[in-house]
């Protein structure tokens, strides 16, 4: 094979065949395991709790540190911290997943219609997306939840998703815009497929990794925000969740009392869950983009150490361009082809690069 | 100028959404300021309800459209109603007291974290695999931790255990706000810990993004050409690579402002800092609806204006937008 004419598409395409778990990127595996553990705890946790989380002891007036009866100690009024955790994870995960599902649905709906339909509807939907994007979400959430007499977890999740969709919608719109002009879409249109069918069976399947990444990102946003809101006392305080545990520990002056076993476990649980989601998102990026995965290691070419830019937790369109372009250049370099980079300098957008990625 | 008109339209629309949401929320959700006031002062006769409603201008007078237009007129005159919590102070006067605290602290912290994060990102990219680059996993972790949790732990370590910084509040007791040195000293001392927590958590994002874009830019041919010409490393990094790589960071600055405000809100709660966020929290817990709405409106408008400023900076930094090739 002559090196100079190998097209970029020589990178093997991602097959539909089942892959072994161990063949996925390390980050994705770690992230998936962490998130998986939390989902399992959300399902089975309440049955594993050794005590009633709301049980109290009248005789007690101060928090007791970890001991064999209470592995993570107790709260000031004698509630078992471990049981509260096991019961509380469910509510936190529930809010995250519910908000993630609703918001991602809205993102896909707005993003795909905006990108595919184009014209006036694109202008209108983009305007809406950008406007909701710049509204400060947390103060708005605080005001809305402040007005609601009873903020149940479902209501919180719903309000979170109403404000959480624009990020995903923007990225999905950019991708749709580039997919729309692809040959296979034109072919589908020529054969007389309906718009609806083209969207469902041609466009959306090509955006699965992007949608998944936006889902994971939204779940992360929803979990962090709902925990913060509950910590402020604006969420559902009548049920146990990681946020309400933190609220009650703050209320009971856990920090000034030095009762670390009271506030550290829920806080660290949120941090780990968040970390798992961030890692999962990195991994999804690499999965959806074969070239990113191709270049996960460190390589030395022509005396230069080449590594792909680490993916960022949130997929933004500009990142996509840069990363996609970089790794494409990288893949080409490995095969001895000089990468063409002039397109970016001229301000060409998502179009060219994503096209390069997706036809692999 | 297509770029700027488009952005202006977006902000105008966002402002309209904020105002309209603000108008409709109290009308769709049960409970209003007058009832909250009645509950607060049990000695009031039921007949006083009507009087309070008129005083606060919250009753259901006239058609919805009429209410909406008079609401808009009031906003444009800076008339945001009367706070039930600080009665008889107007919402505007309460905001005048609290806004400077937030603007100064959060504004400074945001600018510092942006500059610091961007510079560190540039350096991390330039020295691939160096010490700075190896900090990145820790930075990723910082992004996943809830802000308030970090802030609480910072308070625990630096204020409760080591007594280096005060536990909270904007200034020490015994001072009265004003332009005198002892007070300013006290205010600065109280703002250090909140500022540090804000900077540390928000810096990571800037740094990660800057580094990733910078790495791509360093691979560009013109950077190679600049090096081949024999220009100094410093010149290549700052005027060739960083100059171009910073654009996404500036664009991101606008969008992330909402998150900055959110962080500030929680920060003020954790530190009992006398700014807008803490006042909003107090307004919510004491059902001070006019104040809540006023604060939300002011926060939204501040964020929108800051966005507009970031756009202007972007316009100056990126000549392509001026030529109107922005898609």
Image (tube, coloured by chain):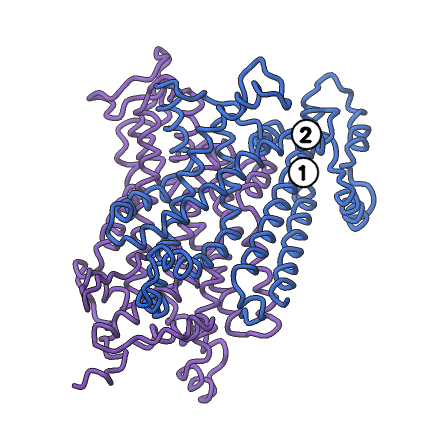
Chain colours: A purple, B blue
Determine which of the numbered discs, if any, sits on residue B94 in the image.
2
Residue B141 in which image quadrant? top left
Q: Which of A147 and A28 is in front in this view?
A: A28
Chain letter for mark 1, please. Answer: B
Determine which of the numbered discs, if any, sits on residue B294 in the image.
1
Q: Which x, y percent locates residue B314?
A: 54, 58
Chain letter for mark 2, please. Answer: B
The reply to whether the C-beta atoms of the residues labelled 2 and 1 are less than 8 Å apart is: yes
Both marks 2 and 1 on one chain: yes
Q: In terms of secondary structure, where does tag 2 sit?
A: helix
Q: Residues within 10 Å of mark 1 (few under 14, many from 20)?
A: many
Query: Can the viewer see residue B190?
Result: yes
Q: Which x, y percent locates residue B177?
A: 62, 21
Of the residues under marks 2 and 1, which one precedes in the sequence?
2
Quarter placement of the N terminus of chain B: bottom right
- In-image side of B99 versus B237 (left or right): right
Q: How crowded is mark 2: few (under 14 residues within 10 Å), some or many (20 or more)?
A: some
**Residue in the picture at 76% in, 45% down:** B76
Q: Which of A121 and B156 is in front in this view?
A: B156
Q: Which x, y percent locates residue B208?
A: 36, 51
**Residue in the picture at 56% in, 55% down:** B313
Query: Can the viewer see residue A129?
Result: no
| B162 up-or-down from B35: above or below | above
- In-image side of A295 versus B145 (left or right): left
**Residue in the picture at 32% in, 61% down:** A285
């Amino acid at each position: 094979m002559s090196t100079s004419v190998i097209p970029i598409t020589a990178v093997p395409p991602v097959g539909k065949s089942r892959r072994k778990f161990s063949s996925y990127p390390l980050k994705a595996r770690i992230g998936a395991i962490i998130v998986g553990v939390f989902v399992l705890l959300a399902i089975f946790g309440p049955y594993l709790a050794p005590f009633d989380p709301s049980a109290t002891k009248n005789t007690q007036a101060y928090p007791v540190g970890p001991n064999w009866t209470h592995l993570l100690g107790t709260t000031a009024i004698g509630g078992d911290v471990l049981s509260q955790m096991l019961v509380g994870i469910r509510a936190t995960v529930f809010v995250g997943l519910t908000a993630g599902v609703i918001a991602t649905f809205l993102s896909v709906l707005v993003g795909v219609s905006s990108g595919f339909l184009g014209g006036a509807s694109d202008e209108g939907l983009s305007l809406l997306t950008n406007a909701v994007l710049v509204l400060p979400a947390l103060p708005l959430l605080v005001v809305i939840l402040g007005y609601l007499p009873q903020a149940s977890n479902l209501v919180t999740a719903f309000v979170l998703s109403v404000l959480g969709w624009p990020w995903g919608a923007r990225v999905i719109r950019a991708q749709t815009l580039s997919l729309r002009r692809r040959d296979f879409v034109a072919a589908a249109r020529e054969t007389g497929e309906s718009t609806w069918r083209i969207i469902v069976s041609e466009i959306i399947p090509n955006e699965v990794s992007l949608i998944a990444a936006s889902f994971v990102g939204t779940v992360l946003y929803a979990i962090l925000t709902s925990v913060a809101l509950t910590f402020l006392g604006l969420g559902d305080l009548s049920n146990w969740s990681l946020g309400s545990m933190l609220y009650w520990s703050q209320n009971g002056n856990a920090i000034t009392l030095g009762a670390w076993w009271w506030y550290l476990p829920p806080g660290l649980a949120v941090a780990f869950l968040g970390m798992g989601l961030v890692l999962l998102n990195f991994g999804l990026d690499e999965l959806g983009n074969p070239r990113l995965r191709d270049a996960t290691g460190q390589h030395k070419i022509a005396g230069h150490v080449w590594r792909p830019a680490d993916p960022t937790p949130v997929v933004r369109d500009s990142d996509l361009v840069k990363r996609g372009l970089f790794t494409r250049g990288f893949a080409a370099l490995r095969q001895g082809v000089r990468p063409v980079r002039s397109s970016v300098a001229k301000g060409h957008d998502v179009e060219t690069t994503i096209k390069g990625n997706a036809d692999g | 100028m297509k770029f700027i008109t488009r952005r202006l339209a977006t902000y105008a629309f966002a402002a309209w959404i904020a105002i309209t949401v603000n108008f409709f929320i109290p009308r769709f959700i049960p409970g209003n300021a007058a009832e909250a006031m009645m509950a607060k002062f049990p000695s009031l006769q039921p007949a006083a309800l009507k009087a309070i409603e008129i005083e606060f201008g919250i009753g259901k007078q006239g058609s919805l459209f009429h209410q909406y237009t008079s609401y808009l007129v009031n906003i444009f005159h800076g008339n945001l109603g009367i706070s039930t919590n600080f009665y008889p102070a107007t919402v505007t006067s309460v905001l005048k007291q609290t806004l400077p605290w937030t603007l100064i602290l959060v504004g400074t912290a945001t600018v510092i974290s942006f500059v610091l994060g961007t510079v560190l990102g540039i350096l991390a990219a330039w020295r691939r695999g160096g010490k700075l680059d190896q900090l990145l996993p820790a930075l990723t972790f910082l992004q996943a931790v809830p802000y308030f949790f970090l802030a609480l732990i910072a308070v625990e370590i630096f204020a409760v255990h080591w007594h280096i910084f005060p536990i909270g509040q904007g200034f020490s007791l015994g001072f009265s706000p004003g332009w005198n040195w002892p007070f300013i000293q006290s205010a600065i001392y109280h703002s250090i810990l909140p500022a540090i927590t804000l900077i540390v958590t928000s810096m990571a994002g800037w740094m990660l993004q800057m580094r990733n874009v910078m790495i791509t830019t360093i691979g560009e041919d013109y950077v190679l050409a600049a090096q081949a010409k024999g220009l100094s490393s410093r010149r290549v990094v700052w005027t060739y690579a960083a100059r171009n790589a910073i654009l996404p960071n500036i664009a991101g600055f606008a969008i992330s402002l909402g998150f900055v405000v959110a962080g500030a809100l929680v920060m003020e709660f954790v530190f009992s800092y006398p700014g807008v966020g803490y006042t909003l929290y107090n307004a919510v817990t004491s059902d001070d609806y006019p104040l809540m709405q006023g604060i939300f409106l002011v926060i939204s408008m501040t964020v929108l204006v800051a966005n507009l400023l970031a756009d202007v900076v972007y316009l100056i930094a990126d000549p392509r937008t001026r030529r109107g090739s922005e898609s």
